[in-house]
Image (tube, grey):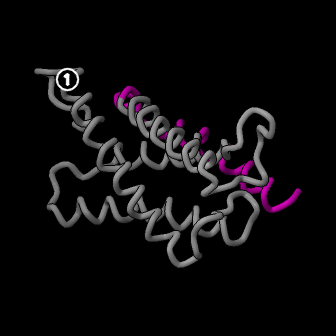
């Protein structure tokens, strides 16, 4: 088993195993969070692949799509789901910003290291030093937009009954 196969295996297992730890009362919030962020990563990855900015040499579905399935469609949306599930609603602004920074950093440095040390992902139009900055900007945008949508959706879905975060 190559390092790429090993990583892809764990990127498949970790999101599925983490489903067992989602509280039953927050399952709807988790599903909405996962699907919303999944839509952003899907669209973003398709655009980057089609413009020739990124390439996935080793992937599971070699004939159906040129995008890496496990990291972009399972692992990264699950990180966002946990971001939403444990978001500190009633905390200070500093704690909220730190929460954003930690979760975005998990994704950015994961992508950066797999692009440097494996063949799972290759950036074609950027230098190694510009990748993390672009990734931080992109994922900060994704996180803010998706968080606003999930918050709006959860308030509209149970109007008058509190918030999903409670």
**Nearer to me, 42 or 21:** 42
Measuring 86% from the left and 60% from the top, which residue is drawn there? 2
Where is residue 27 drawn, in percent x and y? 41, 29
**Nearer to me, 118 or 86:** 118
Image quadrant holding the C terminus, namely top left
Question: What range is drawn magenta here?
Answer: 1-28
Q: Which residue is situated farthest in the front direction here?
A: 51
Q: Is residue 53 above or below residue 127?
A: above
Image quadrant holding the N terminus, namely bottom right
Q: Is residue 111 above or below residue 151?
A: below
Measuring 74% from the left and 48% from the top, which residue is drawn there? 9
Where is residue 40 drawn, in percent x and y? 45, 40
Q: Which residue is situated farthest in the left direction here?
A: 160
Numbered disc 1: secondary structure: helix
| 102 lies left or right of 164 | right
| 141 lies left or right of 66 | left
The crowd level at tag 1 (other Cα within 10 Å; few <14, some 14-19, many 20+) is few
Where is residue 165 drawn, in percent x and y? 25, 38
| 48 lies left or right of 56 | left
- Please identify the quarter of the rendering in which residue 103 is found: bottom left
**Which residue lies under the disc numbered 1?**
156
Q: Which residue is situated farthest in the bottom direction here?
A: 129
Q: Is residue 108 above or below residue 37?
A: below
- Asked if residue 145 lies in the magenta stretch, the reply is no
Q: Which residue is situated farthest in the right direction here?
A: 1
Where is residue 49 drawn, in percent x and y? 63, 48
| 94 lies left or right of 87 | left
Measuring 28% from the left and 35% from the top, which residue is drawn there? 149
Principal secondary structure, stretch drawn in magenta = helix
Q: Is residue 28 above or below residue 22?
A: above
Measuring 53% from the left and 67% from the top, which residue is drawn there? 109
- Asked if residue 16 lies in the magenta stretch, the reply is yes
């Amino acid at each position: 088993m190559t390092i790429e196969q090993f990583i892809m295996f764990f990127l498949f297992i970790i999101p599925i195993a983490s489903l067992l730890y989602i509280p039953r009362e927050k399952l709807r919030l988790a599903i909405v969070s996962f699907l919303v962020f999944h839509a952003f990563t899907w669209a973003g990855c398709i655009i980057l692949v089609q413009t020739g900015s990124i390439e996935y040499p080793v992937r599971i579905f070699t004939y159906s799509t040129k995008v890496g399935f496990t990291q972009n469609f399972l692992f990264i949306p699950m990180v966002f789901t946990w971001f939403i599930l444990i978001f500190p609603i009633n905390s200070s602004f500093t704690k909220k910003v730190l929460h954003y920074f930690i979760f975005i950093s998990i994704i950015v440095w994961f992508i950066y290291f797999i692009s440097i040390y494996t063949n799972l992902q290759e950036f074609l139009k950027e230098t190694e030093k510009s990748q993390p900055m672009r990734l931080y900007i992109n994922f900060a945008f994704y996180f803010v937009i998706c968080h606003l949508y999930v918050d709006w959706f959860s308030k509209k879905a149970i109007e008058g009954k509190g918030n999903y975060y409670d």
